[in-house]
Image (spheres, rainbow, N blue to C red):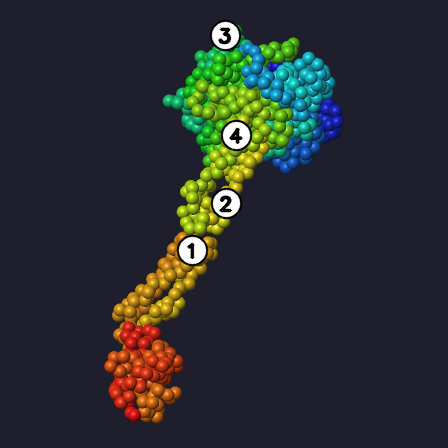
Amino acid sequence: MTPRALLAVLALAAAAPVAGASAATAVAAAPAAAAGGPVPARSAPIESALRDLTAPQATGKAAAPGRATGLQARAGRVLIDVSVDGTATAAARLLRELGMTVTATSDALPYAAVEGWLEPGRLDRAAALPVVRAIEASWAPVADVGPVTTQGDAAHRTPPVRALGPTGAGVTVGVISDSFDWQTADATFPAGGEFTSAVAILTDDDAAGQDEGRAMGEIVADLAPDATLKFASGRGGSVAKAAAIDQLVAAGARIIADDVVYLSEPFFQDGRIAQRVDAVRAAGTVYLASAGNRARQSWEGTLSPGADGYHDFGGGDTTQTLATVPPGATVTIELQWAEPWGRAATDVNAMLVDNATAAVLASAGTVNPPTGNPRERVEWKNTTSDPVVLGLRIRRASGTGTPLLKWIQQDDIAGSPVAEYATRSDTINPEAASARGGLAVAAVRWNDPGTDTPQASSSRGPKTRLFSASGAPLPVPEVRAKPDLAAADCVATSVATPRPSSYLTFCGTSAAVPHAAGIAALLRSARPQLTADQVVAIMTSPANAIDCTASAGVPDSDCGAGFVLADRAFGALDTTPPTVTAAVTPPAPNGNSGWYRTPPTVTFAVGDPESAVTGSGCEPTPVTAQGSVTVTCSATSVGGTTRVPVTLRVDTAGPAAPVVTGLRPGATYPANEVPAAVACTATDATSGIAGCVAGRPVTARGPRQLRLQATDVAGNVTTASVPYTVAAAVDRIRRPLSTALKPTPTVARLLGATGYRVTAQGVPGGRLTVKVQRGGTTIATGTAVARGGRVAVRVRATSAGARSRVRRARGRQVSVSATFVATSGSTPRSTVRRTIKKLR
């Protein structure tokens, strides 16, 4: 609808007051009154396309001919998206009082929003409300239908899978598109024909829908005939689409196929739809979205304004040639720049010009700061009879920033490439398809030889985010590998709507999405216990797909993991868990008693030839913890879970420093008194002590070190050295040793019980030995241990032989030797000899 026609509709409807409006706002029902009435000085930004609607009404002038619009108008009202401070519920109440018909609300980041229908003449008053941050048009969504023409069931090899049992039974698949049955207001579409059971229609677009949703539903039903289908329209704005997602999940959808996109959603951060997709994926729903049909119709570059504010595309050229637009064709440019959503700091305008004449054909000049969004949308339809070479100019209207610019082009001229200054930038749909939790589906023609060539129009990736959902700059840009997989398009359906579109041959990523959703439904039908992450892992495994050859490597920016194959994904309905084999490096403990003395590394070989495997704790793990450590790999496939624990004993540290006993560290000892009985002790908290060994003390004079060595059970060794000093020997035996015969005996008496004694005093620890000899032959001995510095030995002949030898020694001389052997010292032996003549 052209602005002139749209204004005519709006003007007719604006004459009647809005039902239910308050008395204070009833006067605003008439556009002229609203435009001429007092408007407070404070006014939030209003998108320039909406300003263009109000200006002709206020001035009585017609809109400029030749401009196209994607504005959604109905009964004299336009669908708008109002960003607000506070809660959406509170703002909606104020907007209803102004006459707005509220259709949806959202409190998702980065700001709350209210969507609904409002007469253009009341936009200024809405913008003046204190809670309103900005007002934008809720542009008509884009459905990713391809411009060309054909059978995905066989191409994806799903018949062999259904032959094994799964048919989609027990699985609810939700479809989001424009409409399902625009000709009726029925809440169900009857069973029969393409559908084995009735389809629940939660919401529909009976005014502008083309039943693309029914064509998508037919494809899902072809692959998974017993799946339960439910539909919700994605039209009505991004807030309404987010609500449609929630409706389907609440209705039990475990898989959602979505082909509606709002290019006005943020390019550089997750908007409300992307956030909802992540939330439902986390809750267990597999979300599949069309990647887009814009090939690489995008450009990126840092804003480089000249003195007049116009961006320099290169070499001083401030006009970028886009394409040659044939008569009747429309080109739309969605321009955004890298600033937080809802907090634009730079005001950037865009205009489309005729390259031949430099005439401005269309422009967008929303005043974006300080509460508006960093975006502009400009579009133009060639209503002339000649082709026009279309150019784009970008101007910084205010601010000093030079943010990254990015535009994506939407047109109906078969995805023409960017004619000048092409940057081959991504065109992945910015909302659901770009979400972390969403699977972006590319398109491959069903009968492409090898099914490995993406459609030329299929949007390419990857997608880059620069801000968090709240608008905080990311420390590092987040590059998301998109698309995620590819599926068939240009297939036959029975939907032949009488409107401009027909889906008898259904092309584009809109047709690819339901094929992927049908395979996901079969997976969940066969294994209801599969988590969303497991389904995604199976469908995005390169092993279960045909790699697209347009780009090297897999996954790639053309098809992701590739053209998904159902039979590979199922792996003959895997019923066995993965195999998990553990290996340790080094393979055997390198310490004693089964202990590792260096950190071992545990690796796991995980495999399942029948299905994809997700694992936890299965990555190579160096074990640095001490003691008994268990590393467990848990691997899960369609067939179940295998857990393999590996327990190792690790002690990489030696014992605590050993401590000496029997020798005083730092002490000085006489050479004849250096301790001989030394030992050591130590502790080890991990494997325990195996032993502690002390060296033999050295008695040579000078500074000395006694080496100690402690060994733990694992074999780790800790050594220590204990210092001591050896001085000159000291003979502590007092001479002479006293000998006495008590009383002086005869030989006979010597043999009696009395004998004689040898004593010594002031001696260290040791032993005194006394020998009685005659002619070198020992005839009697005695020995005693010194105690308290004193020792006494009593010598007696105690055996018959000894007594015989003594009798033969009567009257002869005998020698008595007393030898003291100290238990320490370098000269441990002292001897005193004395000769005694025995008396008769």
Residue depicted at 48% across the width and 51% down the height: 627
Q: CA distance from mark 3 to mark 1?
A: 93 Å
Judging by the rendered image, the residue that carries numbered circle 3 is 386
Along the line of sight, the residue nearer the viewer: 104 or 645: 645
Residue 17: tell me if it is visible.
yes
Judging by the rendered image, the residue that carries numbered circle 2 is 647
Badge 3 marks a residue whose secondary structure is loop
Which mark is first along the chain, 4 or 2? 4
Along the line of sight, the residue nearer the viewer: 115 or 443: 443
Along the line of sight, the residue nearer the viewer: 560 or 739: 739
- Tag 2: residue type? Thr
Q: CA distance from mark 2 to mark 4?
A: 24 Å
Answer left or right for 380 relative to 699. right
Where residue 134 appears, x then y in whole percent? 59, 30
Q: How many marks?
A: 4
Badge 1 marks a residue whose secondary structure is strand
Picture quadrant where residue 36 is located: top right
